[in-house]
Image (cartoon, grey):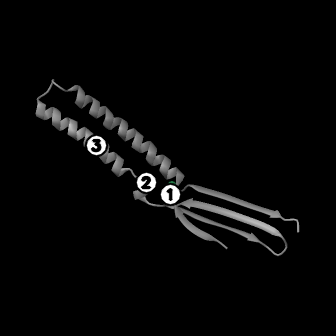
């Protein structure tokens, strides 16, 4: 009657997106500072700063990838129609990582 599935947790995804946006903002600021150093510092140092800033941005994209962190949301759900005509369904989800939970249940006596 119940089926299990592991999915990406919406709360974990939101947390990861917010963390990524914050780190990208910092890295982009670092890139802006490096670009503003053009002509003010030796060319090789300018090049180093530019490469470091660009590497930071691409590594943030790779590091904070929710699909790599895995599917931490366990979902259980099922539907049933009893001989009496009582239809019921239920859904329960819980994240093993952040503790997010959601529960929904439904039942209705059908007209036979
Ligand atoms: Zn979660």
Q: Residue at the spot x=62%, y=56% of the render?
A: 102
- Residue 63: x and y in percent read 34, 51
User: In the rendered image, which quarter is residue 89 located in?
Assistant: bottom right
Q: Residue at the spot x=59%, y=56% of the render?
A: 101
Task: Verify CB contact (< 8 Å) between mark 2 and mark 1.
Answer: yes
Q: Which quarter of the rendering shows the N terminus?
A: bottom right
User: Spatial distance from mark 1 to mark 3, Cα to Cα?
Assistant: 26 Å
User: Spatial distance from mark 2 to mark 1, Cα to Cα?
Assistant: 8 Å
Q: Residue at the spot x=11%, y=34% of the render?
A: 44
Please tell me the numbered disc located at residue 66.
2
- Residue 34: x and y in percent read 23, 31
Q: Residue at the spot x=78%, y=63% of the render?
A: 107
Please tell me the numbered disc located at residue 8.
1
59 to the left or right of 72: left
Read off the residue under disc 3.
56
User: In the rendered image, which quarter is residue 57 located in?
Assistant: top left
Badge 2 crowding class, 10 Å Cα cut-off, few under 14, some 14 to 19, many 20 or more, is: some
| Mark toward the start of the polypeptide (2 vs 1) | 1
User: Spatial distance from mark 3 to mark 2, Cα to Cα?
Assistant: 18 Å
For label 3, the SS is helix
89 to the left or right of 24: right
For label 2, the SS is helix
User: In the rendered image, which quarter is residue 45 located in?
Assistant: top left
| Mark toward the start of the polypeptide (3 vs 2) | 3
Task: Verify CB contact (< 8 Å) between mark 1 and mark 3.
Answer: no
Badge 3 crowding class, 10 Å Cα cut-off, few under 14, some 14 to 19, many 20 or more, is: some
For label 1, the SS is loop
């Amino acid at each position: 009657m119940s089926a299990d599935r592991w999915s990406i947790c919406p709360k974990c995804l939101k947390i990861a997106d917010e963390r990524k946006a914050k780190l990208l903002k910092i890295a982009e600021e670092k890139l802006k500072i490096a670009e503003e150093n053009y002509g003010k510092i030796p060319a090789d140092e300018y090049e180093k700063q530019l490469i470091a800033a660009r590497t930071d941005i691409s590594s943030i994209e790779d590091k904070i990838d929710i699909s790599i962190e895995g599917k931490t949301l366990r979902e259980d759900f099922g539907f049933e129609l009893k001989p009496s005509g009582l239809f019921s369904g239920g859904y329960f989800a819980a994240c093993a990582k952040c503790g997010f939970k959601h529960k929904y249940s439904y039942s209705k006596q059908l007209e036979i």
